[in-house]
Image: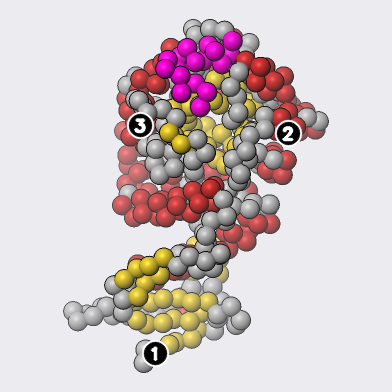
């Protein structure tokens, strides 16, 4: 029988500079195991839900798998904090790691607790695993060194303001997007550089480039290709960001701005990430889609660009009146006083739609589907605005 050593101290959880809290064990409770040529003992930490004590189990499991279990346990703390702020998207499955191991075999156990409740939660859970794997292959120190070779950052907000002043219409963030979970493949003949160049010629102020591969058929390679092709429009890395590591990675690939989704990130994460963005020269577009998220973001210092997504991120239903509703009254007054640029997102297909959100108070719009599906995306921009807005 394998020995169990019970440690009657508690784990302490602290917020870290990344979005994943760290777990530490007091120095007096650390047990060191010696590795020899015959076998390797690993340590798995478990928290007794009744006593709050930590139990160390020695077994033949790999240290890597033991740490994955512990990372999942700590992730539950993130879910609890998020829930207090009205965030319904869980960072990790609450009933246990979905991957289970018996000897050399791995299987996935499906139950109500570790099954995503909606498409956004599924995307976030997948992204959590994806980022963990990327961080193992490309640690932050490696990414930081690569920043020295990254192309210079461009002024994303400045480009939107200039376009708004030049045309009298909202500055356009045109989206380079091949597919979406709700609409499927949007454009079969998909050449990201050709689409980006057509957008720029058609008068786009900035571009948004999807980098999620599994659900949107995007990639960081597309981002790099567009940047290296000489497209002058500042680039937004359209990604589901859950970890500060992703900010460094986006900047190393040539991004000028990143998307932070309030439906996914607790306030502390947004605050830290906004500060990191400023250090890196990145613009943070913070996205909201209801009153509670908007109020949370307005309470965070340093936010200069806020997007209102007219699509419910849990049901994917569209309602462009969301923009008007959120910008009415006191919130609209605060936005004007702070000179924050508001961006209308999703559900914009006609000149009437553009006029509606502009009257509501937006100075920019982010549009993908209605123009990327056109045979000539540049002409699609003219149709969207009801006039030629090219320079």
In the rendered image, the residue lying farthest to the left is: 37
Say which residue label 2 marks. Answer: 326
Task: Give the image quarter of residue 160.
Answer: top right
Q: In the rendered image of this protein, does residue 30 appear above or below residue 121?
A: below
Q: Nearer the viewer, residue 349 or 201?
A: 349
Circle 1 packing at 10 Å, graded few (<14), some (14-19), many (20+), is: few
**Which quadrant of the structure image shows residue 344?**
top right
Q: Earlier in the sequence, mark 2 or mark 3?
A: 3
Q: Residue at x 36, y 36 (%)?
A: 220
* Residue on which the image places disc 3: 222
Q: As rendered, which of 64 and 283 lies closer to the eye? A: 64
Do residues under tags 1 and 2 come within 8 Å of each other at their CB atoms? Answer: no
* Image side of residue 251 versus residue 355, left or right: left
Based on the picture, tell me whether residue 328 belongs to the magenta stretch.
Answer: no
Which residue is disc 1 drawn over? 3
User: Which sits earlier in the primary sequence, circle 1 or circle 3?
Assistant: 1
Image height check: is 358 above or below 119?
above
How many numbered marks are there?
3
Decide if residue 97 is on the left or right side of residue 107: right
Front residue of 101 and 11: 101
Q: CA distance from mark 2 to mark 3?
A: 33 Å
Q: Secondary structure at mark 2?
A: helix
Residue 164 visible, this orientation: no
Mark 2, residues whose alpha carbon is within 10 Å: few (<14), some, or many (≥20)?
Answer: many
Q: Where in the figure is residue 381, as x and y percent of width and height?
A: 51, 15
Distance of mark 1 from mark 2, alpha carbons? Answer: 58 Å
Judge from the rendering whether residue 250 lies leftward or rightward of residue 171; answer left or right: left
Please state the horizontal and vertical placement of residue 161, each as a whole percent of the image. Answer: 58, 18
**Quarter of the figure with the N terminus:** bottom left
Residue stretch in magenta: 369-386
Depth check, front residue: 204 or 234:
204
């Amino acid at each position: 029988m394998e020995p169990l050593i019970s440690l009657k101290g508690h784990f302490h959880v602290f917020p870290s500079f990344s979005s994943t809290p760290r777990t530490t064990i007091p120095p007096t409770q650390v047990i060191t195991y010696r590795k020899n040529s015959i076998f390797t003992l690993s340590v798995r930490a478990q928290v007794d839900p009744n006593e709050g004590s930590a139990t160390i189990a020695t077994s033949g499991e790999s240290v890597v798998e033991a740490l994955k279990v512990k990372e999942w346990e700590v992730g539950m703390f993130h879910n609890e904090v998020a829930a207090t702020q009205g965030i319904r998207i869980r960072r990790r499955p609450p009933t246990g790691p979905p991957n289970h191991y018996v000897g050399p075999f791995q299987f996935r156990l499906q139950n109500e607790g570790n099954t995503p409740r909606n498409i956004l939660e599924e995307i976030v859970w997948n992204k959590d695993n994806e980022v963990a794997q990327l961080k193992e292959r490309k640690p932050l120190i490696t990414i930081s060194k690569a920043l020295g070779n990254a192309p210079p950052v461009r002024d994303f907000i400045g480009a939107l303001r200039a376009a708004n002043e030049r045309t009298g219409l909202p500055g356009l963030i045109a989206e380079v997007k091949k597919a979406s979970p709700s609409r499927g493949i949007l454009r079969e003949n998909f050449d990201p550089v050709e689409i980006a160049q057509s957008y720029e010629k058609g008068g786009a102020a900035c571009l948004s480039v999807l980098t999620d591969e599994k659900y949107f058929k995007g990639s960081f390679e597309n981002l790099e290709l567009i940047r290296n092709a000489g497209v002058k429009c500042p680039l937004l890395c359209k990604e589901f960001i859950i970890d500060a590591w992703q900010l460094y990675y986006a900047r190393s690939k040539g991004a000028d701005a990143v998307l932070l989704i309030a439906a996914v990130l607790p306030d502390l994460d947004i605050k830290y990430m906004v500060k990191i963005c400023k250090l890196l020269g990145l613009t943070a577009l913070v996205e909201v889609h209801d009153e509670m998220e908007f109020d949370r973001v307005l309470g965070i210092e340093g936010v200069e660009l806020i997007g209102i997504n007219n699509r419910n991120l849990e049901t994917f239903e569209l309602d462009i009146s969301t923009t008007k509703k959120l910008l009415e009254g006191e919130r609209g007054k605060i936005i004007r006083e702070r000179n924050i640029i508001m961006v209308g997102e999703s559900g914009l297909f006609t000149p009437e739609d553009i006029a509606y959100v502009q009257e509501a108070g937006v100075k920019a719009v982010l549009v993908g589907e209605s123009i990327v599906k056109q045979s000539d995306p540049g002409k699609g921009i003219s149709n969207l605005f009801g006039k030629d807005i090219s320079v």
